[in-house]
Image: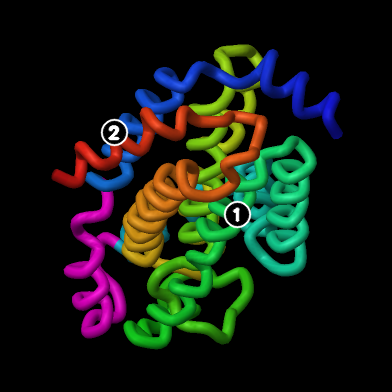
């Protein structure tokens, strides 16, 4: 375990100023993306679907390429149980094994967006696409807004992208990892529309809400980093400097 810690800290972890700079850029993006969610959720409660929802779904479903169909089905499959739980648990175990204990705790919090999403589904209570309007590959019993697949991909997957972007030094492996995460998040929404299990507005609402939860997760992570796990040797922080920085922001 000590060997893993030393190898990761020496070869993979970027400097603290670089980590702070990257974190600020990422957080600014996700906060900006979250402003429209409340208005969309309220509207979705009263409107079963918008004209653009029908247009986007029919456009996606009009393409029947074999590779495209397989990709859409596979990406969507990743968000169903039990594979979503197994994948998430595997990621958390890797973080803990690498000595990134606080990162694992914050990632678990990011993944809890699914619980919030389930509660919002009950409040908004919007029906999923009807088979009389579009092709529905498989009917699901729950309501539609927001998309749980997209919400989890954006919040949990986005937080993993944040960790890779802010903690790891520039390398080909880092680029591949970030690309895979970004493509997974970007394709999850279209896959849910393609399968006829969500409307476009369900998906966009989930992307926005996921961005908001992601921003909250990042804020929790950055503040908690200087309060908890002070003995963590991997990706450690300057306790005094970070505390002064946070205090100056609060003035």
Residue drawn at x 22%, y 69% is 38
Q: Quadrant of the N terminus?
A: top right
Q: Is residue 188 left or right of residue 17?
A: right
The prevailing secondary structure element of the residues shown in magenta is: helix
Residue drawn at x 58%, y 23% is 168
Foreground of the two, 66 or 197: 197
Residue drawn at x 70%, y 50% is 92
Q: Nearer the viewer's eye, disc 1 or disc 2?
A: 2
Q: In which quarter of the image is the C terminus?
A: top left
Dot 1 falls on a residue whose secondary structure is: helix
The residue under label 2 is: 245
Image disc number at residue 127: none
Q: In which quarter of the image is residue 80?
A: bottom right
Residue 59 versus residue 165 in the image, above or below: below
Is-magenta flag for residue 68?
no
In the image, residue 22 lies at what x, y percent? 39, 26
Q: Can residue 32 be spotted in the picture?
A: yes
Dot 2 falls on a residue whose secondary structure is: helix
Q: How many C-alpha atoms fall within 10 Å of the one at disc 1: few (<14), some, or many (≥20)?
A: some
Q: In this view, does 115 lie to the left or right of 203?
A: right
Q: Residue furthest left?
A: 251
Q: Residue furthest front?
A: 240
The residue under label 1 is: 105
Q: In which quarter of the image is residue 94?
A: top right
Foreground of the two, 245 or 70: 245
Residue drawn at x 48%, y 78% is 118
Magenta stretch bounds: 33-52
In the image, residue 133 lies at what x, y percent? 41, 75
Q: What is the spatial separation of the Cα atoms under label 1 and label 2, in whole angstroms?
A: 23 Å
Residue 225 versus residue 79 in the image, above or below: above
Residue 239 versus residue 87 in the image, above or below: above
In the image, residue 50 lies at what x, y percent? 25, 69
């Amino acid at each position: 375990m000590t060997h893993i810690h030393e190898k990761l800290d020496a070869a993979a972890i970027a400097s603290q100023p670089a980590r702070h700079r990257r974190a600020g850029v990422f957080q600014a993006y996700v906060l900006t993306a979250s402003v429209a969610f409340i208005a969309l959720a309220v509207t979705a409660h009263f409107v079963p679907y918008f004209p653009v929802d029908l247009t986007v779904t029919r456009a996606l479903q009009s393409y029947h390429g074999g590779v495209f169909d397989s990709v859409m089905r596979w990406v969507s499959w990743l968000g169903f149980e039990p594979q979503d739980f197994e994948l998430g648990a595997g990621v958390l175990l890797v973080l803990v094994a690498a000595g990134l204990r606080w990162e694992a705790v914050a990632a678990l919090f990011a993944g809890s967006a699914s619980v919030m999403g389930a509660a919002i589904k009950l409040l908004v209570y919007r029906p999923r696409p009807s088979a009389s309007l579009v092709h529905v590959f498989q009917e699901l019993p729950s309501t539609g807004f927001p998309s749980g697949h997209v919400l989890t991909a954006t919040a949990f997957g986005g937080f993993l992208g944040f960790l890779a972007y802010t903690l790891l030094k520039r390398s080909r492996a880092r680029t591949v990892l970030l690309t895979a995460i970004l493509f997974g998040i970007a394709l999850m929404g279209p896959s849910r529309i393609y399968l006829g299990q969500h409307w476009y507005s369900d998906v966009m609402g989930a992307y926005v809400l996921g961005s908001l939860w992601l921003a909250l997760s990042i804020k929790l992570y950055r503040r908690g980093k200087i309060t908890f796990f002070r003995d963590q040797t991997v990706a450690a922080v300057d306790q005094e400097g970070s505390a002064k920085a946070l205090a100056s922001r609060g003035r």
